[in-house]
Image: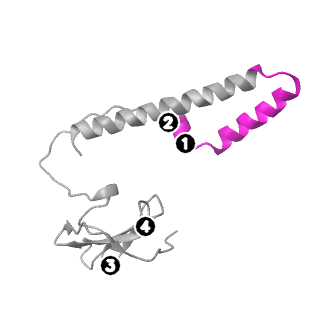
Amino acid sequence: MSYNAATDYIERYNAMVERINTTLERAASKAASALADDVREAANAATHVADTSTPLGRGQQFKYAPDDQSGDITEVAARGVSMTGNEPGGYRINPNGQDVDYFDINGNLCAQYHESHGPAHGHNFNDGVRNSSHLPMSPINCR
């Protein structure tokens, strides 16, 4: 990922954290200013929001700081999976629960299944290069 892409990503993340924190602050402020029966209802609603919110709601902003270049290069495919050095013959279900990466007997990325964007499809890898064709596939229940 380039410096500009990383910086843009961080800025979007920080803006999202700000929006979430502002929304939570507004909800808490409304709950505190409600009267009579509305106080109890607003407090219950605020508690429910706080209990069911993701940890991102309490996330801290961060700033991009480039690492020192050691000369080592690690090839990484989309979503952070390594092109090599994975569990031989294994697979990895991505955090989104809708995409799966498959590894050959040497631990190299050899195929991907995607359901997170567009109709279910797959990609094959040949000598570390992903085929950009979207091969139609039946949905796989990988969750």
Q: Say what amino acid the circle numbered 2 marks.
A: Gly
Residue 83 placed where, x, y %?
24, 64
- Mark 2 residue crowding within 10 angstroms, few (<14) / some (14–19) / many (20+): some
**How much space separates mark 4 and mark 1, taking CA atoms?**
30 Å
Q: Which class describes the residues within 10 Å of circle 4: few (<14), some (14-19), or many (20+)?
A: some
Disc number lying in front (2 or 4): 4
**x 77%, y 31%: residue:** 42
Q: Nearer the viewer, residue 75 or 70?
A: 75
The mark found on residue 59 in the picture is 2
Instruction: Tell me where the magenta segment starts and ends, as one range.
Output: 33-58
Question: Measured along the vertical axis of the image, is residue 24 above or below residue 118?
Answer: above
Q: Earlier in the sequence, mark 2 or mark 4?
A: 2
Gap in angstroms between the C-alphas marked 1 and 3: 34 Å
45 sits left or right of 80 in the view: right
Mark 1 and 2 residues: CB-CB less than 8 Å, in contact? yes
The secondary element bearing badge 2 is classed as: loop
Query: Could you tell me how far apart the alpha carbons at marks 2 and 4 are, in whole angstroms?
Result: 33 Å
- For residue 55, which numbered disc appears in the image? 1
